[in-house]
Image (cartoon, grey):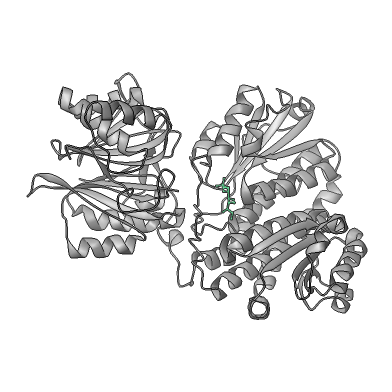
Amino acid sequence: MCGIVGYVGGRNAVPVLLQGLKMLEYRGYDSAGVAVFNSKAGEIKVCKTKGRVENLESKLYDSPVAGKIGIGHTRWATHGVPSDENAHPHFSSSEKIAVVHNGIIENYVVIRDFLRGQGYEFVSETDTECVAQLAGYYYSKSGSFLDSVYRVLAKVDGSYALALVCADCPDKIITVKKNCPLIVGLGKGENFLASDMPAILKYTRNTFIMEDNEVAVIEKDSVKVYNKKKEEIQKEVYVVDWTIEAAEKSGYEHFMLKEIYEQPKVVSDNLNRRFKSDGTGIRLDSIKLGKEELEGINQIYIVACGTAYYAGLVGKFLLEKMARIHVNSDVASEFRYKDPLIDEKTLVIVISQSGETADTLEAMRLAKRKGSRVLAVVNVVGSTIAREANDVIYTLAGPEIAVASTKAFSAQVVAMFLLTLHISLERGRLSLEEFREIKAEMELLPSHINTILTSAPNIKHFMEKYIGSKNVFYIGRGLDYVVCREGSLKLKEIAYLHSEPYAAGELKHGPIALIEESTLVIGVATQQNLFAKTMSNIKEVKARGARVLIIAMEGNREIENYADDYIYIPKTHPVLTPLLANIPQQLFAYYMAVGLGNDVDKPRNLAKSVTVE
Ligand code: M6R
């Protein structure tokens, strides 16, 4: 999704903005731009272009702009095609005010029509331009930059993080947000704003988070924040514990590969943090989810989007199987509009890496309005979902930069394992002995992941063999089917290959008609109790000419009779296999994307954090 960065201070703003925009590239975008106040000319200069930040850089090289205050933007098109005209920043007609915007202004047509009636002409197809023009309109009446921003806010509906500069106020940026993330970074003699921490991590780790309807006036030596009533308020500053190294590639060819290789550490960090040292259970810190609270709950509802949703499905499967509690699940975009059957006896678990996904956030707010308690499983500390949920379990995966989620998924799955163990223990469905057995197996997971990672060269070899595939099917049963859904999503996202996950038993009810000579079928068969059933489905596709790559548990050598190729995961407890079986799928999707020459970390049309509907 779109990214925003802003700078006020003593340095040339352009390199700071460009560096910030580069760090936001991972969010996904199709054009980029900056607006910088040029003190020599006494005016704001805007430079923007369709395409990558490098295009913007070369445009700035050809026609340099300089100044000590500026705003920058990466746009992910919503209203109007990716083009130079639609790229941000947008100017008011007078060129007094320039604006960058994340989100969607829902009533932009009404505002545009009103301004057209006042003689204003629009040069882009965007919703954002109406903000710039409206601010310019009010500024022409009042001559006050801050008042104009407040008047704009009274008129616009929708979601936004906005940063505005005014040619007559060359010392400040005004920024405001509603339902879109925005942070302010504090430096010495310089201050920053950004939609996401990596953009300013190189310069400062002291930040505060803007809340909805707050307005910040950012100058070189001061930042003032006002509430909706224009009263000044104090913000709590916190120090981010991410390092710039964590947000860099550290020698890996892609962030995705780096993040795949970080998984052993992410898993062990979570386990170290969560297992009680005396081996009697799970540490949930201040989260109250004991026997008494669980008695007040008659169902759990898991809500998330994309990969996070699949982590949730692992949780659903395990909670039902082990804790014997009824668990419903939905993708957030469906949940929020279906008047879900939830109440104060429902525990709603929302899962989100970014903690900013618009649908998940709204689903959570709906659940709270209906009286449910919301437990959020989130990666980004201080994100909106984390702040608004009743309780939070942080997944400790560190910054995930690649659009395709890998380590965050593994961390979410581990969180689901831990929650299941906790709830099962509290409900008396799991004995301490069984708990200790699973715990011991879980402690081996980091080393098992390392073992799987050593098979990367084989998986690369499979990529070379199967790179010509046009359709790929993933089949499995039970937990393996959930793994298939995640594997198939990953392949679509970054290799742009058509792929479908099927519950293996469903093949005969239709999808098997799609299998033809050489179709690639990836079979996931780690569940011993379902192994024979899955194998008979494998035989059926084999008999119809499919080429089959099987992921199975070590020791199940029977697969070698049916598979063209196979990957073994180390032996583990059956409930833990989703974590391990998914790793070869991540590597396979990664190598396919590399082999096809795709932009692995920034796949087309996708954004890291989907902050609009
Ligand atoms: O930040 P979130 O976990 O809420 O994001 C949810 C999905 O948008 C995300 O998992 C998406 O499916 C990823 N690109 C998958 O790799």
Q: Name the residue rendered at 49%, 42% in the picture.
A: 611
Direction from residue 527 to residue 422 in the image, left or right: left
Write down the quadrant of residue 126 in the picture: top left
Direction from residue 30 to residue 499 in the image, left or right: right
- As drawn, 557 above or below 132: below
Residue 533 makes an appearance in the image: yes
Residue 526 makes an appearance in the image: no
- As drawn, 238 above or below 586: above
- As drawn, 383 above or below 338: below
- x and y, in percent, of residue 524 in the image: 79, 64
Residue in front for this viewpoint, 608 or 344: 608
Residue in front for this viewpoint, 284 or 141: 141
Write down the quadrant of residue 394 in the picture: top right
- x and y, in percent, of residue 340 in the image: 70, 28
- x and y, in percent, of residue 117 in the image: 26, 26
Q: Residue furthest left?
A: 40
Q: Name the residue rendered at 85%, 72% in the picture.
A: 544
Direction from residue 302 to residue 142 in the image, left or right: left
Q: Name the residue rendered at 51%, 73% in the picture.
A: 597
Total labels: the figure holds 0
Write down the quadrant of residue 237 in the picture: top left
- As drawn, 308 above or below 360: below
Residue in front for this viewpoint, 327 or 541: 541
Q: Residue furthest top?
A: 229
- x and y, in percent, of residue 405 in the image: 58, 56
